[in-house]
Amino acid sequence: MKMSQSFIYTMKETPKDAELKSHQYLLRGGYIQQVGAGIYNLLPLGHRVIENIKNVIQKHMNQSGAQELTLGFVTPASFWQKSGRYEKYGKELLRFKDRKDQDFVLGPTYEEGIVECIKGVIKSYKQLPLNLYQIHLKFRDEVRPRFGLIRGREFVMKDAYSFHSSVEDLDREFDLMEQTYRNIFDELGIRYAVVEADSGAIGGSGSKEFMLLSECGEDTLIICPSCGYASNIEAGVRQNRQLQTLQAEEKKIHTPSMKQIEVLAKELKIAPEMILKCIIKGVRTTQGNKQALFFILGDDQLEETKALNALIKKDESVLELYELSQEEMQGFSLGFVGLGAGADYVFYDLALQKGEKYLTGANEVDFHCIKTFLEGEQVDLALVREGDGCRHCGCALQYQRGIEIGHIFKLGTKYSQPMGATFLDQNGKAQPFIMGCYGIGVSRILSAFIEQNHDDRGIIWNRVLSPFESVIIVSNMKDEAQKEAGEKLYQKMLLEGKRVLFDDRSERFGVKMSDFELLGIPEAFLVGKELEHGKIERIQRLDLSKQSIMIEEFLRN
């Protein structure tokens, strides 16, 4: 492609609202163009990169035995109503009516759509397993879109769905997809970690995330430097804590205005881990609002995703947690809530040891008490901290930042059962499909890769992702010899099937070099003053190193 004839433009100024380098460089380099909050046009350069990502994904997905299709972007709301997610999904689901007053949604994910697609078509276990995938637009009405393509509302995603007759076959496909994803990200040249994860709004039992490692990542990862254990912080587990116990008789203690753990620990001269902290949350359910109490050790923090998951496991009508108003809090002695307090739901963290004494609120203003923890529903509620022991090897855990670029789930019958999607098993009995789900954030990779591969001048693509393999830069287009040499180089590379960009613009040399550095194309062939000696320069974008080569020799080879 000749740059003088292309829709490629660059900007010198950094856009005001672009915080991350990837967002800045994609806008400045003319890869994307903002249309609205979290919505972007993919311009020719950005489109080329997306197509390169798609090609790698398609190659490996096809090799795995998956088949590609395309589902409708607009999905009937009735699909989501059948699965029970129409109300549960939240405000990220964009709902609308057509002219016939029929309800529709813009698909943020396609579990419902794919179930309806195969329902009644796949009838027998003999037609299983089946894995169908698409690379398609999605829309999630994010409350706070940011960071360009990393957290957009409209985005391109690869989503795959597998159907099985047994849990064992789902496990086999899950492992195959994990390896397929590793192959995809390895070929794309991404540095990533595979971590245990929470399934979120998708649901299901097993879940792993593929996290691109980057300091600007929105997700916090827990990494064990010794054994390799890795998890998203929402699903992180730790070694059982070695705790000090409270050696004292059960009694009531006057603690006027002592609501903070730090104050209690200092005044009573006890360790924070000997004190129980009670977190009160509102719970929205399909039956109305309720209240929940979560008890954790005084030096721990509540991990809200774990808390929500515990609630959903206990009560499928639960939708979300929210902060209670002062009016809703009136039934509690705030700052002094402890063991024995009642609510619609009460949970205790796994770190609490039954039979041990703790300082806890006395459920009376200005009073605490020492009380033995004897019974209660215990679940993992605590946020794993840096320095906590690894559950597997005991080594101190570390935090790392990452960007989610892939996620695989074991869905089981979460969607097939409520939607009535069944097959006949070997005994001729109708069974709900056992399902898996596998996603890759295609457009997100465009930005995320740049976060790992850039410098102060611009993007640094590898050959797999780059919109072009090479760029030919003619220093002075008014010099007929340089212009002719550039054209010869261009035609030779085209004949060889190379993806080559010819910067034939009548611009200053400095502008052309700045654009080369910004656009990030792996190498440039510079036709300049050295042509008088029969030479051109090859410049590597990675380190801007230069090599003189004889043009005639290059044209012959």
Image (cartoon, rainbow, N blue to C red):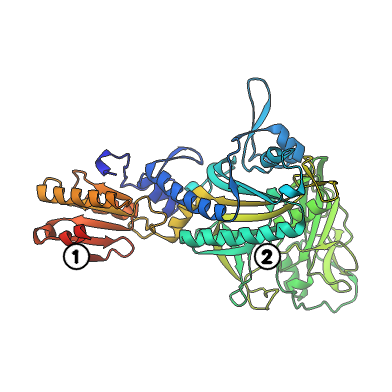
Q: Residue at x 86, y 61 (%)?
A: 377
Q: Nearer the viewer, residue 229 or 184?
A: 184
Residue 327 shows up from this direction = no
Q: Position of residue 310 (x, y in %)?
A: 78, 56
Asked if labels 1 and 2 touch by Cβ distance under 8 angstroms, the answer is: no
What is the spatial separation of the Cα atoms under label 2 and label 1, in whole angstroms? 53 Å
For residue 548, which numbered disc appears in the image? Answer: 1
Check disc 1: other Cα within 10 Å, few if <14, some if 14-19, many if 20+: some
Please tell me which of labels 2 and 1 falls first in the chain.
2
Q: Residue at x 63, y 52 (%)?
A: 438
The location of residue 475, given as percent across then percent down, is: 17, 52
Specify whether residue 271 is in view. yes
Q: Residue at x 23, y 49 (%)?
A: 490
User: From the viewer's perspective, is residue 267 above or below residue 79?
Assistant: below
List x then y, in percent, for residue 276.
79, 66
Q: Using the image, determine if residue 454 lies above or below residue 10.
A: below
Number of marks drawn: 2
Inspect the image, locate mark 1, and give the three-letter code of the amino acid beneath it: Ser
- Camera-side residue of 178 and 200: 178
The reply, left or right, for residue 409 in relation to residue 489 is: right
Question: Split into 4 quadrants, where in the image is the C terminus?
Answer: bottom left
Locate the N terminus and report the quarter of the image it occupies: top left
Disc ID at residue 236: 2
